[in-house]
C-alpha cells in the first residue's frame, strides 16, 4: 500500500459546500526520503523504506550515518517500511503529499494517548458496584467479583481489570481526504486520528 509518514498537527473544522461544519485533522505528511529499497532477490520481500524528520548530527550514531549516506540524505528520526507500493521509486527519491488526492480515502495509524494506570470504570466503562445502593459505602468504582469459588479456583485470562490505558497502536480506516496543501505539505482528513499533537502517524491508501 502506498503511503507516507507524517506528524499530527492538531484538529480544526471546515465548512463544506452545503454549510455543514466538518471536524477534521491536519497532518504534516512528508516530505519522505526513500532510504532503502527492499527486493525479493536480496531481502525475500518487496518494500520501500521511507524516512521522515531530520535528526541532528549530535544524536546520530555511525551505523545510521552509513545507512542514510547511501540515500544521500541526513539521518531520520522516523523510519517505516511500506509493502506493495503502487509505483516504483529509486533510492534517495523524495515523496511528497502529492501522493494523495482530494476525495480519496486513507488509513491513518498512530499511537493513542497514554492515560496511565486507570480503574475499570474509566478503562472498560464499568458502572461500579451496586450503583451506590444496597449499602455500598466506598466501593462505587470497584470491579466487584472477579472469579468463581472452588472451581475453577482462579481468575480467567482476559478478565477486564484495572491497568495501564492507552499507548496502543491504533488504525483509523477510511478517512476522507478533504484538502491537500502541497506547498506546506499538509493533509486535511475528515475526523480524528490517534495520538497527541506532534506525534508521528502513518498514512496509507
Image (cartoon, helix red, strand yellow):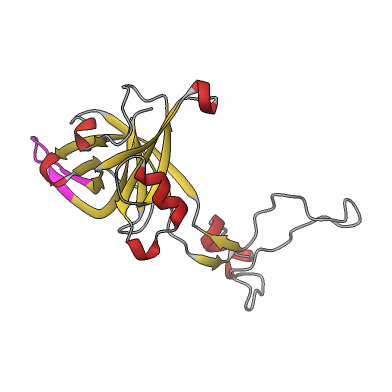
Q: Residue at x 82, y 55 (%)?
A: 148
Q: Is residue 22 magenta?
A: yes
Seen from this angle, which residue lies furthest right? 150
* Span colored in magenta: 13-23
**Residue 159 position (above or below residue 59):** above
- Looking at the picture, how far across and down is residue 117, in whole percent? 56, 67
Q: Is residue 132 left or right of residue 10?
A: right
Residue 203, quarter of picture: top left
Q: Is residue 111 in sight in this rendering?
A: no
- Looking at the picture, how far across and down is residue 131, in whole percent? 58, 65
Of residue 23 and residue 33, the one placed in the foreground of this image is 33
Of residue 69 and residue 123, the one placed in the foreground of this image is 69
Q: How many marks?
A: 0
| Image quarter in which the C terminus is found | top left
Of residue 4 and residue 88, the one placed in the foreground of this image is 88
Q: Is residue 8 left or right of residue 115?
A: left
- Looking at the picture, how far across and down is residue 58, in whole percent? 36, 66
Q: Is residue 198 magenta?
A: no
Residue 191, quarter of picture: top left
Q: Residue at x 74, y 50 (%)?
A: 157
| Image quarter in which the N terminus is found | top left
Q: Is residue 42 in sight in this rendering?
A: yes
Q: Residue at x 16, y 38 (%)?
A: 180
Q: Residue at x 44, y 56 (%)?
A: 62
**Residue 164 position (above or below residue 33):** below
Amino acid at each position: 500500500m502506498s503511503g507516507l509518514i507524517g506528524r499530527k498537527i492538531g484538529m480544526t473544522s471546515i465548512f463544506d459546500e452545503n454549510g455543514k461544519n466538518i471536524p477534521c485533522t491536519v497532518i504534516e505528511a512528508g516530505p519522505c526520503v526513500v532510504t532503502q529499497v527492499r527486493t525479493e532477490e536480496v531481502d525475500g520481500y518487496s518494500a520501500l523504506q521511507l524516512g521522515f524528520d531530520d535528526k541532528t548530527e549530535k544524536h546520530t550514531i555511525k551505523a545510521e550515518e552509513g545507512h542514510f549516506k547511501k540515500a544521500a540524505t541526513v539521518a531520520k528520526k522516523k523510519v517505516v517500511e511500506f509493502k506493495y507500493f503502487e509505483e516504483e521509486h529509486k533510492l534517495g527519491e523524495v515523496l511528497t503529499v502529492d501522493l494523495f488526492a482530494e476525495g480519496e480515502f486513507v488509513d491513518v495509524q498512530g499511537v493513542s494517548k497514554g492515560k496511565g494506570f486507570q480503574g475499570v470504570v474509566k478503562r472498560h466503562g464499568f458502572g461500579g458496584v451496586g450503583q451506590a445502593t444496597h449499602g455500598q459505602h466506598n466501593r462505587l468504582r470497584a470491579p466487584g467479583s472477579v472469579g468463581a469459588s472452588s472451581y475453577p479456583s482462579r481468575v480467567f485470562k482476559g478478565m477486564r481489570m484495572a491497568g495501564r490505558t492507552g499507548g496502543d497502536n491504533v488504525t483509523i480506516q477510511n478517512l476522507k481526504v478533504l484538502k491537500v496543501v502541497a506547498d506546506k505539505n499538509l493533509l486535511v482528513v475528515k475526523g480524528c486520528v490517534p495520538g497527541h499533537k506532534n506525534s508521528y502517524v502513518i498514512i496509507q491508501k
